[in-house]
Image (tube, rainbow, N blue to C red):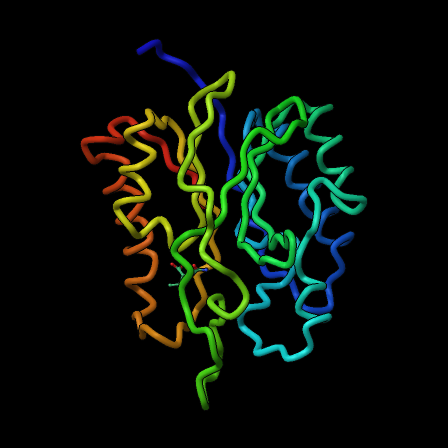
Amino acid sequence: MKKRMVHLAVAQMGPVQRGDSRAQVVERLKAMLQEAHRRGARWVVFPELALTTFFPRWDLKDQAEIDSFYESSMPNATTASLFVMAMQLGVGFYLGYAEIVGGRHFNTSILVAPDGNVTGKYRKIHIPGDAQAQDNAPIQHLEKKYFEVGDLGFPVWQTEQAKIGMCICNDRRWPETWRTMGLQGIEIGMVGYNTPSAYVQWDEPIHLRMHHHLLSLQASSISRDTAGLSTMAC
Ligand code: CDV
C-alpha cells in the first residue's frame, strides 16, 4: 500500500441547547471548519445530530415539534453556507443530523468531499435507548422513539485521499460495523457520537466511559479485517 499523509480533524463543538437555532449552530460549525483548515486538516468530523440539541433526551409529545428537529434535504437553506465554505477551503467533512424522508425518521450522517459534494450517506443501525419514556428517569434516552433502524448498510466510499466509512455513536461498539466495512477495505472510519453523561439502561461509571469508548475504537482498528484503519470519533 502506498504511504499517504492525510490531515484529519475532529471538531468537538460542545453542547447545543434546545433554544439554539440551526443558523447559530451552522456558524459554530463554520468557525471550527476554518480553524481545522488553518491547522492543515483535509477532513473534519462533526458530532452525531450536530445541527440541533440532542432531542432524544426529551419525551416530546407534539409531532410538529418533533418533526422540527429533522432535515428533509441536505444541503438546505440553513446549511448551504457550510458546504460552500468547505468547497472554498477544500476541506471535506462528516456531519450527523436527523433526517426525515417520506415520513420516515433516521439518525443520519453524510460524507461531504473537499469539492463540496455529498459523496456518501449512512443511517444509524444500532439505535440505543427506549421507544417509550421510563418512569422517574432523570434523563431519558429515546432514540428508539425518534428513529427507525437505518436501511443503507455500512458502505465505504473511495475518495481522493482514502477509502472512508461512516457509523454513528453506538454503532462503534459492535464488531459487525467494523467487519462489514473492513471487508470493503476501509482506511478511515468516521464516527460522530453523543454519549450521555448518564444513561438510563446502563449505569456505567464515569471513569470507564472514556475507557470503553477508546477500547471499542482501538480494538476495531487493529482487528484482522480492519488492519491499518484510522478511526476519527467526535
Ligand atoms: N447516542 C448514542 O448512540 N449513545 C450510546 C449510548 C446511549 C450507550 C453510545 O454508545 O454512546
231 or 109, which is in the foreground? 109
Between residues 122 and 199, which one lies in front from this camera angle? 122
Residue drawn at 62 percent across, 52 percent down: 99
Q: Is residue 222 left or right of residue 4?
A: left
Q: Position of residue 46 (x, y in %)?
A: 56, 44
Q: Quadrant of the N terminus?
A: top left
Camera-side residue: 36 or 96? Answer: 96
Ligand 1, by image quadrant, is bottom left
- Residue that extends furthest to the left in the rendered view of this protein: 224
Location of residue 113 by image quarter: top right
Identified at 33% across, 43% down, the residue is 177
Q: Is residue 71 left or right of residue 80?
A: left
Outermost residue, front side = 102
Say above or below: 23 vs 135: above
Q: Tell me residue 211's x, y (percent).
A: 28, 55
Q: Position of residue 40 (x, y in %)?
A: 57, 24
Toward which corner of the image does residue 185 lie, by quadrant? top left
Which residue is depicted at the point 67% across and 44% down?
29
Q: Quadrant of residue 190?
A: top left
Q: Residue at x 57, y 39 (%)?
A: 110
Residue 217 at x, y percent in the picture: 31, 44
